[in-house]
């Protein structure tokens, strides 16, 4: 079995409930500015924690699921 580097293991730690915007962007493979844009448009949920803006880890998965559903719908409609 291949060993996972510490940086990767930390980045995908399933016990972390709230991510920084940078961590959420990294998980999505997008830039920080684009991630803030998704938050601003309401496409990606975020919550304030004091002066910080955090993204629930579940919100990242929900966003990806919505993208996948939209992609499947669009692909299905283009075939019909």
Image: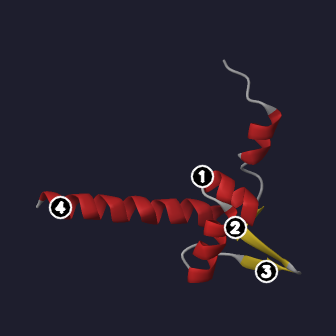
| Residue 66 to residue 12: above or below | below
Outermost residue toward the top?
Answer: 1
At mark 1, the secondary structure is loop
Q: Residues within 10 Å of mark 3 (few under 14, many from 20)?
A: few
At mark 4, the secondary structure is helix
Of discs 3 and 1, which sits in the foreground?
A: 1
Is mark 4 in CB contact (under 8 Å) with mark 1? no
Outermost residue toward the left?
Answer: 80
Q: Quadrant of residue 80?
A: bottom left
Please tell me which residue is depicted at 47% across the width and 60% down the height of the picture.
65
Mark 1 vs mark 2: which is more N-terminal?
1
| Residue 50 to residue 65: above or below | below
Q: Which residue is mark 1?
A: 29
Mark 3 vs mark 2: which is more N-terminal?
3
Q: How many marks?
A: 4
Q: Which residue is mark 4?
A: 78
Q: Position of residue 14 (x, y in %)?
A: 71, 50
Q: CA distance from mark 3 to mark 1?
A: 23 Å
Q: Position of residue 58 (x, y in %)?
A: 63, 63
Is mark 1 in CB contact (under 8 Å) with mark 2? no
Mark 3 vs mark 4: which is more N-terminal?
3
Tag shown at residue 80: none
At mark 3, the secondary structure is strand
Q: Which residue is mark 2?
A: 56
Q: Which residue is mark 3?
A: 48
- Front-most of residues 67 and 13: 67
Q: Is residue 17 visible?
A: no
Specify whether 71 is left or right of 79. Answer: right
Please tell me which residue is depicted at 44% across the width and 66% down the height of the picture.
66
Q: CA distance from mark 1 to mark 2?
A: 16 Å
């Amino acid at each position: 079995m291949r060993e996972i580097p510490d940086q990767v293991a930390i980045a995908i730690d399933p016990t972390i409930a709230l991510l920084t915007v940078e961590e959420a962007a990294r998980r999505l493979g997008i830039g920080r500015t684009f991630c803030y844009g998704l938050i601003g448009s309401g496409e990606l949920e975020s919550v304030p924690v004091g002066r910080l803006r955090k993204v629930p880890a579940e919100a990242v998965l929900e966003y990806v699921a919505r993208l996948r559903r939209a992609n499947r719908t669009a692909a299905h409609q283009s075939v019909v």
